[in-house]
Amino acid sequence: MKHRFLALLLALSLAFSVLSLPAAAAGTNAALQTAVTLGALTADQAAGSSGILTRGQLAQMLAAYSPYRSTLSAQSGTGKLFTDLAADAACAPAVRVAVNSGWMSGYSDGSFRPDEGVTLEAACSAVLSLLGYDLTTLGGDLASGLIAKAGALGLTAGLPASAGQTLTLAEGSQLLYNALTAQTSEGQVYASTLGFTVTDGVVDAASVLLSGAKGPFVAKGNESLPFAPAAVYRNGEASDSAQLSAYDVYYYSESARTLWIYNRRAAGRITAVSPSAGAPTSVTVAGVSYTLASSEAAYQISALSGGGVGQVVTLLLGMEDEVVAVLTGEEADQVFYGVVQTASRSLAETNGADVQQAVTVLCTDGQTRTVSADKALNFPAGWLVEIRVSPEGETVEALAGRSISGQVNAEGTALGELAFAPEVEILDTTSEGVAGTIRPSRLSGVTLSDSDVRYYTLDENGAIDRLILDDVTGDLWEYATLDDVRQLTEFVGEQIDQALGSDSGSAGSQSASAGTALASLLPSTSDLLYSAVDGSLLSTLWNTLSSGVGTAASALLQLAADNTSGALSSLLGFFGSGANYVCWRNGEQVSYQTSVKYPVAAGGIAVSKSTTGTVRAMVQLMPVMVDQLGAASVTSGGKRYETADDMQVYLWYSGQYYATTLSQLNTEDYTLIGWYDNFGCAAGGRIRVLVAVKKS
């Protein structure tokens, strides 16, 4: 009992110390990304997108966003159009298309001036011409007419430039990106005339690119492509490396100079084929069903070739996780590492009655696999295991820890002295089995201790190719903000006082106000936010909390010293019983039902769950007053805090939370409170919840 009491007191003290020690997002640019994907910009140009937009670059953009984008190479070397533009110049084919189509024109002296900057009105003129509008009908002042027409069509949305100003590459990319969803002179959405799909104002450029893509191919080694890729995507993520390894599945678009590489694999024993063994269109391996993308793959696992249920295979998966090729025999050998999600035993009656065990594992490649395991072995959720696939079948074995420590470099390419392999797989996990893959860049600059790394492996070059972490990022927790909890805290105090008052002896009379004292230390959400408005968040309220911790501790310690009967038991029993925490998470009101009470007071909280959804822990987040907003960070008193990719943003008004977005807020009109995780994750410390209160 004494140890339980001390643990409770420590938990409460830690919670209050968190609250009493306040310290004094770059999103994807869709316009630039689309420009690079379509070949309107190179990756280097996109990286320097603050540079000026030139006439030559505008011509390249116009051509890339036109029906001629796939035929530009045919315009090369067909003669010199302008005195200052060689026929073999990089932008010459695009200039030829832009001039011949009437989108742009040269100067009377025979020059084109490809390096001259482009003003807003000149760019609007070119894009309106691309959309088929007759500029002679605009009337009035031409520059203002061009900009007004472009604005009416939504072309200038998001552009801060005004008449006479030279555009940047980023602004030019935005203008062309806006053109995709603009109406043409014939009343069509421009993107639809190019074969793009537009849904809710968002353009699906992939459909156009993939319609002209070649593949899938299965690499035998270091294949050479017929072009140098300008954009490379590996397993759906942008990559700097175009290197192909054996058994990689790849696609490419020569016109878009884009390469897609996939090294996802499924391995194990086939447990089902559908719709028939002779003509399968899908196959189930390791508990997951996959579509067969080729007649060759279908034949390999069909009964016609001796394949099918019971066969051990490795499936090479393509762009939509479809099966491109099937490996058998020794080629099918694979080893996967991961964390157990669940393990279950069930009755099997295939060859008489028996019990079989299925273990579901989330592996470092992000794939969840379910494999058979020895029914006599136990595989609790959270254990690290190795799945080995060979022609003889599948085996699952527990892994002993293998740790390493050091700092990840700023580029996210090495841990200490060991480099990361180009396709390194990193899995963050919790002891309960909750897990998720992360990019190496997520760990940039982070120092990892031995206790942060649960397991790692090295490839043939001595580089880390798999890394399993122990709750390093904090991203595996759920984050929420408590609804007003004043009623809960007052109820806590009343219950404590009632328990103490019902006991006989001096303990009850001496400490009957312990619960009320404790409850008075817990602020409600209203207290927090109103104190933020009047400026006392970092002074009066928090100083009261800090100075009051000793009072509460003294009362509880006195109770422990004096009481040997039911009052202390009742008090601890109250904290040991369950509770229902009403919160806001991801814009919706949710409830967390727990088996014990947690020392969270108000504002942002972190919730740890098991793989079955049971709450295993609840921790108070640290508040800071935000005085400056950035794209991926905020500052408070000169200290920078990174924001989580999925940071929740709320407007608070009169006791109610309203989900909003960061773009709607500023520090001039709103008081902003950021709540960040401060409970020991090496790569944590990120703002998880941002609450705004309008100053007016």
Image (cartoon, rainbow, N blue to C red):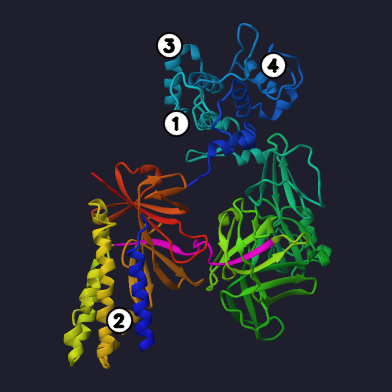
First to last magenta residue range:
465-483
Looking at the image, which is closer to me, 167 or 668?
A: 668
Q: CA distance from mark 1 to mark 2?
A: 57 Å
Looking at the picture, how far across and down is residue 216, in whole percent? 74, 48
Q: Earlier in the sequence, mark 1 or mark 2?
A: 1
Looking at the image, which is closer to me, 394 or 548?
A: 548
Amino acid type, callout 1: Ala
Q: Which residue is mark 2?
A: 574
Q: CA distance from mark 3 to mark 4?
A: 33 Å
Q: Earlier in the sequence, mark 3 or mark 4?
A: 4
Number of other residues with Cα within 10 Å of mark 1, as a class: few under 14, some 14 to 19, many 20 or more: few
The quadrant holding residue 350 is: bottom right
Q: Which residue is mark 4?
A: 85
Q: Earlier in the sequence, mark 3 or mark 1?
A: 3
Number of other residues with Cα within 10 Å of mark 3, as a class: few under 14, some 14 to 19, many 20 or more: few
Q: Which label was assigned to residue 139?
A: 3
Is residue 366 in view from this perspective?
no
Amino acid type, callout 4: Leu
Disc tally is 4
Mark in front: 1 vs 2: 2
Q: Left or right of 214: which side holds 654?
A: left
Amino acid type, callout 2: Phe
Looking at the picture, how far across and down is residue 274, in whole percent? 69, 63
Mark in front: 3 vs 4: 4
Looking at the picture, how far across and down is residue 367, in whole percent? 63, 62
Q: Secondary structure at mark 4?
A: loop
Looking at the image, which is closer to me, 635 or 491?
A: 635
